[in-house]
Image (cartoon, coloured by chain):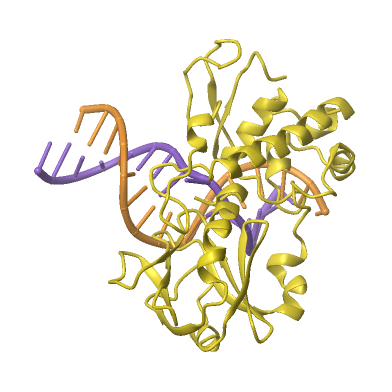
Chain colours: A yellow, B orange, C purple
Amino acid sequence: MPELPEVEALRESLVDRLVGDRVRRVVVRDHRLRRPIDRRALDGLVGATVRAVERRAKYLRIRMDGGRSLVVHLGMSGRLVSAPAGPPALHEHVTWTFASGRTLRYRDPRRFGLVYVVGDAAIDRHPDFASLGVEPLGRDFDAAYLRERAAGRRGPVKAFLMDQRVVVGVGNIYASEVLFRARVSPRRRVGTIGPERWGRIADATRAVLARAIDAGGTTIRDYVGGRGTTGRFQAELAVYGRGGEPCVVCGTPVRRTVMAGRATYACGRCQR
DNA sequence: CTTCGATCCTGAAGGC
DNA sequence: TGCCTTCAGGATCGAA
């Protein structure tokens, strides 16, 4: 479930449930994620209280008192839910129990995600955070920024948009959706894009992500969200997952191709 | 530096 | 029903 809108929807759903609650206990059942979980570091947060729940790129950052943060990345199949106490689900690798009696549960069948603790003073220098690009809904993201960052690059615009060192949070679903809305072909080389197209791409990125956040994210073949609720944006997907179906604008069948090993959807008529 | 392909891992879905 | 293949929302690493 993890592109920017899903993580942001998750953050919103968790903030009221976690802030002010104190960690009473942590259970790590399987430490083998993309990087091994440091059990002792997680244990070190027992007794600490949640001060804020934030998001940077696709990382969820749970700020604790004592100057440390719990960082969670969901990878491809990670889920994080706040739920009443109860038996662990399949692939529930970490469970936090709070003073309120509620639990926070991290599930991740494929184990591509991350769970770790980092000091607040050092987080900007952490390798996961140091080279992240701008937030797409922030002030620094616009056509001029994209044009500048594209200088000297030659690859297709879809890969450029998904490069987290350029702009964060756009993954495989939203890259196709953004480029459809911007009427730009995902194969187009960044060097051939002028100010007008960059403007459409910047506008479409903001619009698609903001709308997806409002809808609670996109849920494909499982649920999302800290309340176990389902995202609604999948009903608004214009091209993703619609290979062969008519384009919502012109009726031409949507084409599914593979770029860099990832499914890519586009209308060959609307997008140039 | 960029870009490309392979890779990590498990489960769901589709074809036969 | 069972078996096999393909695909999946991410990110990193080595090679060119």
Q: In this view, which residue lies farthest toward the top?
A: A251
Q: Image check: A179 left or right of A109? A: right
Q: Quarter of the image holding residue A217?
A: top right
Q: Is residue A60 above or below residue A174?
A: below
Residue, x 77% and y 54% (percent of image)? A133
Q: Nearer the viewer, residue A201 or A23?
A: A23
Q: Is residue A168 above or below residue A185?
A: below
Residue, x 81% and y 27% (percent of image)? A197
Q: Nearer the viewer, residue A194 or A143?
A: A143
Q: Image check: A68 left or right of A140? A: left
Number of numbered discs visible in the structure rendering: 0
Residue A156 in sight in this render: no
Residue A92 in sight in this render: yes
Position of the C terminus of chain A, as image quadrant, is top right
Residue A144: horizontal and vertical position, in percent?
Answer: 90, 39
Q: Quarter of the image holding residue B5?
A: top right
Q: Nearer the viewer, residue A133 or A140?
A: A140
Residue, x 83% and y 28% (percent of image)? A193
Q: Is residue A193 above or below residue A146?
A: above
Residue A82: horizontal and vertical position, in percent?
Answer: 44, 65
Residue A27: horizontal and vertical position, in percent?
Answer: 40, 81
Q: Image check: A235 left or right of A153? A: left
Residue, x 45% and y 51% (percent of image)? A224
Residue A4: horizontal and vertical position, in percent?
Answer: 62, 50
Q: Image check: A122 left or right of A52? A: right
